[in-house]
Image (cartoon, rainbow, N blue to C red):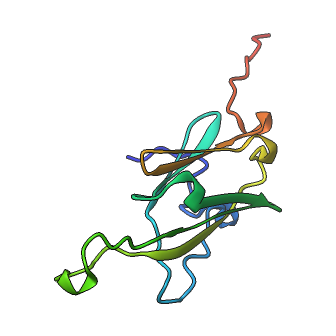
């Protein structure tokens, strides 16, 4: 059974669809990199696969509670294009946007790019961190 958390509330519906993605722009030159989102007590983490890309190919912005990831994976012809039998991997520009929940500390968001994976760490403010309340026996 999946535990009930902020990412999986009892209703099965995300509050305000907080991680709604506007998705890729409908253009032949765009592609959509796969991503995972997970939550801990203190933060929400977004991991995006960006193989064969470098730090300078990716841009991460946060404005008015909207996280935007954009970049471009360029086709590097090491073999003449006419010699390819099939090209299934996607190339070109991408853009993903996510509406963040209000409990994220926007000024503490950190993005790290390592070995083809972009990791964006979104710390929660103290009010969103679960805490245990002691009950006094009278």
Q: Residue 39 sits in which quadrant?
A: top right
Q: Is residue 93 left or right of residue 115?
A: right
The vertical placement of 61 against 125, above or below, is below
> Residue 119, how many percent across, how many down?
54, 46
Residue at 80 percent across and 61 percent down: it is 63
Return the residue nearer the eye: 23 or 131: 23
Quarter of the picture containing the C terminus is top right
Residue at 78 percent across and 48 percent down: it is 106
Q: Is residue 87 left or right of residue 135?
A: left
> Residue 14, how many percent across, how many down?
61, 61
Q: Residue 99 sits in which quadrant?
A: bottom right
Q: In the displayed orientation, state which residue is furthest to the top.
A: 138
Q: Is residue 78 left or right of residue 111?
A: left
**How many circles with numbers are drawn on the protein?**
0
> Residue 21, how many percent across, how many down?
59, 70
Residue at 71 percent across and 40 percent down: it is 124
Residue at 74 percent across and 47 percent down: it is 104
The vertical placement of 128 against 134, above or below, is below
> Residue 74, how many percent across, how many down?
45, 71
Return the residue nearer the eye: 97 or 99: 97
């Amino acid at each position: 059974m999946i535990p009930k958390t902020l990412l999986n509330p009892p209703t099965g519906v995300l509050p305000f669809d907080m991680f709604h993605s506007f998705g890729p722009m409908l253009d032949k030159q765009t592609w959509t990199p796969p991503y995972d989102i997970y939550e801990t007590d203190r933060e929400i983490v977004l991991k995006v696969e960006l193989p064969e890309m470098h730090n300078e190919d990716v841009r991460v912005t946060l404005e008015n509670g909207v996280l935007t990831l954009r970049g471009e994976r360029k086709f590097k012809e090491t073999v003449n294009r006419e010699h390819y039998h099939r090209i299934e991997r996607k190339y070109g520009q991408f853009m993903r946007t996510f509406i963040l929940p209000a409990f994220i500390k926007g000024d503490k968001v950190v993005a790290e790019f390592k070995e083809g994976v972009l990791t964006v760490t979104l710390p929660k403010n103290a009010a969103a961190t679960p805490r245990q309340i002691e009950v006094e026996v009278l």
